């Protein structure tokens, strides 16, 4: 039985225009039909580029934004339809760690006040002394000194502030913590400390995480299952090892090939799928498959007209692509010129220069010839 | 003779009533024609200040700049404002991190691009507009004629960065300084921009000084890499050499703390403990010593010098270099033996509870030892 289950969750923001009449002229389809389930004790990672709706989805689970349609079932209760007061009580069990550790801590509250506020609201601890005792324990666990209690957020470094954010979630003994970009504001050496802390806490307390991040390497490292989002919907979901070994959606493949690996050997020899153009606007998403305007494997039929549903490929691997099997078997090659495939160090235009005509927002970049970049290094 | 040769560059920020802050304390490196040189480090290591000093963009008040930076025979650091302005934009150009705040929001892109052409190449009117359109086209902006009339907010992040690159290469500069050019961008857009920069270097022979915190970007792009820590180069090596054998404990620790997309899962990361705030002045010893798992009392005998403990040309500023480990080992998915790298298992075991900043649960005695030794050293020096 899943602890958290999302069924066709949609979050649409109205776009209003006009001074007198305030008409709604359209919607931004931030999250458009996402279904997924999170097992207890597991980490579910959500990745995608900016504007794909991953943060909105996280906030929708906590009802920090209104859910337009669909169900958010947590432990048997549909949170999407819960009255506000009952939802407030449920938030003890669902907590969030935010991206910007300074922006999410009130600069005028000291750490004790920040951490005890939630406990007071949920009636945890009989009096302040009891609460303080408990806060001390949690602070020690996340690696902060006891004298932090009377200090203010600005006195701490970025990594420590993120530990305060984690402590604030932990004092309420939640079941699920939603971490929205928990390490992206931190330096790499500090990132690793916070990632390790999150993993240790999960083992000790049996926490369930939903980790939202844009960094595929971080998400793969800490997640058991990874979901890849593009323009408001899930395009692929798989156990994280499977996802890395066999990415089936063209977008996942492009995303993975774009992540730089700190190893020259790998960087020089791998194939890189360069997507062209930018993310289409979520206010006016393309018809059919949302990725078809940038997809290197786009086919004449179905892609532009039918919106693919997530299909199960077995082993918990779900993908939303009409042609996933054909692409995996190599029966379809990336003929489309909206992207180019770059082999380590070389730039080889997928199409001869001159015939570069692209569809939609996409346009062929740098179809020029490039000398081998790696030669200079060797 | 290298195109740009930076020698013992120092930048000190002064403020009345406060102690001087040394942001850059003696950085030296060379950049050759057609070469990509990386300056890598975390926030506060002085990488951006180095680039601003080279471009003459630091404020004149409250900043002391020392050392030399020879660009084709002229010292950039002592040039007059007027001569610097002639060089900047034509011979030297810079790309900044945040493309939105480095473009003027109330001026169309076209005017901003042609401004440079008018200033340095004396192009006017239709000729300048045509040249600007062809520049935008060259950096991969579709429909350049329309884009020239648009304002920065109408362009996407990747497009803005392309426009900035177009402005930077407008006069075919000989040296391009890119300060975190892809940090604000998504990975797929980052890949596009890096490919574009690579192409510029290959086709034009432009020298590129790449400033970044991302070791992945460095691995794919740079020929020579300088790792900075607290305002000094701690390791300098050719790209492959550095990643095969990161020898300074800091460089080694950085590589160990990055989750890799292609590494086996289940291994905990090996973070560098503490934070950049745990440091000592370079004069007293190695600034990295308080965070280092390898330090001995020798580390506190004044500034360590750059040595070549491994290979000629691979310079390391450390008295106790790490002589094993690195990307090659990670690739074979074998962690270094604990006795070879004393830090490895200690870091893996107890990093969670170890704080950054002044919070130092583990080894408080060790840290005290460093500090007392540091002060003792100071006193002895006095």
Image: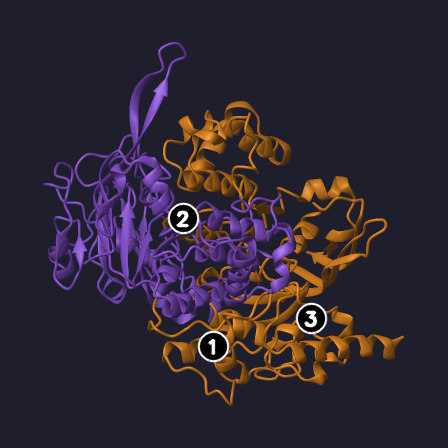
Marks 3 and 2, the one that precedes in the sequence: 2
Q: How far apart are labels 1 and 2 at the CA level? A: 31 Å
Quick one: label 1, few (<14), some, or many (20+) residues within 10 Å? some
The part of the image, by quadrant, that contains residue A331 is: bottom left
**Does mark 1 fall on the same chain as mark 3?**
yes
Identify the mark at residue B287; answer none if there is no mark. Answer: 3
What colour has chain B?
orange
SS for dot 3: loop
Q: Which residue is mark 2?
A: B186
For this rendering, which residue is in front, A18 or B93? Answer: A18
Residue A151 rendering spot, x and y as whole percentages: 65, 54
Q: Which residue is mark 1?
A: B348
What is the residue that sits farthest to the front in this orientation?
A126
Quick one: label 3, few (<14), some, or many (20+) residues within 10 Å? many
- Residue B59 horizontal side relative to residue B39, left or right: right
Identify the mark at residue B77; answer none if there is no mark. Answer: none
Is residue B273 visible to us here?
yes
At x 22%, y 55%, the residue is: A237
At x 71%, y 80%, the residue is: B369
Q: Nearer the viewer, mark 1 or mark 2?
A: 1
Q: Is residue A366 above or below residue A268?
A: above
Q: How far apart are labels 3 and 1 at the CA level? A: 23 Å
Q: How far apart are labels 3 and 2 at the CA level? A: 34 Å
SS for dot 2: loop
- Residue B128 horizontal side relative to residue B88, left or right: left
The quarter in which the N terminus of chain B is drawn is: bottom right
């Amino acid at each position: 039985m899943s602890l958290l289950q999302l069924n066709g969750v949609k979050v649409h923001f109205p776009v209003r225009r006009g001074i007198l009449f305030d008409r709604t002229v359209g919607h931004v389809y931030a999250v458009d039909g996402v279904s997924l389930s999170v097992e207890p004790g597991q980490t579910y990672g959500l990745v995608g580029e900016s504007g794909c709706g991953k943060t909105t989805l996280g906030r929708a689970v906590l009802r920090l934004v209104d859910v337009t349609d669909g169900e958010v079932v947590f432990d048997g209760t549909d949170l999407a339809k819960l009255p506000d007061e009952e939802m407030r009580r449920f938030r003890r069990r669902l907590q969030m760690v935010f991206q910007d550790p300074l922006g999410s801590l009130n600069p005028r509250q000291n750490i004790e006040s920040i951490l005890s506020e939630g406990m007071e609201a949920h009636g945890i601890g009989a009096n302040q002394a009891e609460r303080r005792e408990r806060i001390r324990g949690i602070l020690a666990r996340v690696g902060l000194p006891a004298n932090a209690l009377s200090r203010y957020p600005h006195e701490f470094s970025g990594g420590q502030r993120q530990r305060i954010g984690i402590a604030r979630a932990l004092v309420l003994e939640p079941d699920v913590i939603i971490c929205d970009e928990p390490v992206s504001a931190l330096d790499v050496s500090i990132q690793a400390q916070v990632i390790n802390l999150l993993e240790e806490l999960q083992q000790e307390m049996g926490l369930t995480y939903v980790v939202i991040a844009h960094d595929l390497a971080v998400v793969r490292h800490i997640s058991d299952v990874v979901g890849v989002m593009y323009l408001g919907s899930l395009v692929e979901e798989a156990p994280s090892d499977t996802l890395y070994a066999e990415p089936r959606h063209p977008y996942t493949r492009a995303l993975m090939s774009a992540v730089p690996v700190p190893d020259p050997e790998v960087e020089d020899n791998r194939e890189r799928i360069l997507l062209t153009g930018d993310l289409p606007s979520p206010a006016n998403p393309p018809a059919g498959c949302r990725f078809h305007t940038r997809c290197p494997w786009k086919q004449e039929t179905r892609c532009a007209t039918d919106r693919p549903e997530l299909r199960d490929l077995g082993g918990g691997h779900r993908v939303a692509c009409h042609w996933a099997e054909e692409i995996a078997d190599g029966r379809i090659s990336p003929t489309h010129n909206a992207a180019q495939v770059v082999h380590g160090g070389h730039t080889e235009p997928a199409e001869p220069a001159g015939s570069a005509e692209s569809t939609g927002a996409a346009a062929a970049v740098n179809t020029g010839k490039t000398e081998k970049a790696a030669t200079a290094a060797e | 003779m290298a195109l740009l040769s930076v020698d013992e560059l120092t930048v000190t920020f002064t403020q009345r009533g406060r102690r001087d802050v040394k942001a850059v304390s003696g950085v030296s490196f060379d950049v050759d024609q057609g070469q990509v040189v990386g300056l890598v480090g975390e926030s506060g290591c002085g990488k951006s200040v180095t680039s601003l000093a080279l471009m003459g963009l630091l404020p004149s008040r409250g900043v002391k700049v020392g050392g030399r930076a020879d660009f084709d025979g002229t010292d950039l650091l002592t040039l007059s404002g007027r001569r610097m302005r002639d060089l900047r934009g034509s011979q030297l150009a810079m790309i900044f991190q945040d493309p939105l705040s480095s473009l003027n929001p109330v001026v169309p892109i076209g005017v901003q691009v042609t401004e440079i052409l008018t200033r340095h190449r004396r192009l006017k009117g239709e000729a300048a507009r045509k040249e600007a359109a062809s520049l935008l086209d060259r950096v991969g902006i579709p429909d350049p004629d329309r884009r020239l009339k648009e304002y920065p907010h109408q362009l996407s992040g990747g497009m803005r960065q392309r426009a900035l690159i177009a402005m930077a290469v407008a006069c075919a500069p000989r040296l391009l300084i890119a300060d975190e050019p892809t940090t604000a961008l998504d990975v797929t857009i980052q890949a596009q921009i890096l490919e574009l920069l690579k192409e510029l270097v290959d086709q034009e022979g432009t020298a590129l000084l790449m400033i970044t915190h991302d070791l992945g970007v460095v691995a794919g792009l740079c020929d020579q890499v300088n790792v900075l820590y607290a305002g000094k180069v701690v390791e300098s090596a050719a790209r492959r050499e550095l990643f095969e054998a990161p020898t300074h404990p800091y460089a080694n620790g950085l590589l160990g703390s990055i989750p890799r997309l292609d590494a086996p899962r289940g291994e905990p990361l090996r973070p560098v403990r503490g934070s950049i705030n745990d440091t000592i002045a370079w004069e007293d010893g190695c600034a990295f010593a308080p965070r280092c798992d390898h330090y001995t009392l020798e580390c506190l005998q004044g500034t360590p010098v750059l040595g070549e403990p491994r290979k000629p040309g691979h310079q390391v500023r450390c008295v106790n270099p790490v002589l094993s480990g690195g990307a090659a080992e990670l690739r074979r998915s074998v962690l270094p033996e604990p006795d070879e790298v004393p830090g490895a298992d200690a870091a893996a075991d107890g990093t969670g509870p170890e704080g950054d900043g002044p919070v130092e649960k583990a080894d408080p005695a060790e840290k005290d030892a460093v500090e007392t030794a540091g002060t003792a050293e100071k006193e002895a020096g006095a």
